[in-house]
Image (tube, rainbow, N blue to C red):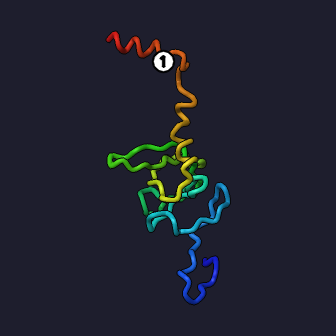
Amino acid sequence: MNLEKKQPGQKKPQEVCFVCQACGAVIMQEGAGSRHRNHCPKCLASVHLDEQPGDRASPCKGVMDAIGVWVRKDGEWAILHRCRKCGAIHSNRIAADDNPIKLVSIALRPLASPPFPLEMLEQMAAMENKK
C-alpha cells in the first residue's frame, strides 16, 4: 500500500510494511536498515509468524512483547520477544530506527528490580573478595 503518489522528480513513495497489532502505528519499510522488518520500531512488539526464522509457518499469530535485549557475539543487539498467546520466545535483530529509549528501558529493567536488596551489594562484594 502506497501512502502517497510519486510526483515527477520525487523519490519513490514509501511502502507500508504493516500496522502494529500492539500500538496501532503504521510502519514503513524504509528506515529499518535491512530488507526485513519484523517488529514495530515504536513499541518494539512483533507478531508470532515463524517457527524457524523466515518460514512464516507458525499457526499462532499472537502478539509478541519485547521482554529483554541481549548482545550477540559480534556486538549486535537483539530483542527477545515473548508471545502473549503461546509463550514462545524468539530473538530478533534490532532495526536502525528502533526507539532507543524503549531499547534502553528494556535493557535496564532487571536492574530496576534486582532479585536481592541493593543494600546487600556491599556485603555480597565483601564475601566474594574473601573467597
**Percent position (x, y) of residue 5?**
62, 84
Frontmost residue, 92 versus 120: 120
Frontmost residue, 20 versus 125: 125
**Percent position (x, y) of residue 21?**
64, 58
Frontmost residue, 29 versus 119: 119
**Percent position (x, y) of residue 131?**
32, 12
Q: Residue at x 56, y 74 (%)?
A: 15
Q: What amino acid is labelled 1 in the image?
A: Leu
Q: Secondary structure at mark 1?
A: helix
Quarter of the image containing the N terminus? bottom right
Residue farthest front in this picture: 9
**Percent position (x, y) of residue 38?**
51, 60
Does residue 50 appear left or right of residue 61 in this picture? left
Residue farthest bottom in this picture: 8
Q: Residue at x 59, y 71 (%)?
A: 16
Residue farthest right in this picture: 24
> Does 109 appear above or below 24?
above
> Does 2 appear above or below 108?
below
In terms of image quadrants, where is residue 7? bottom right
> Does 39 appear above or below 16?
above
Q: Residues within 10 Å of mark 1 (few under 14, many from 20)?
A: few
Location of mark 1 (residue): 121
Q: Residue at x 49, y 46 (%)?
A: 80
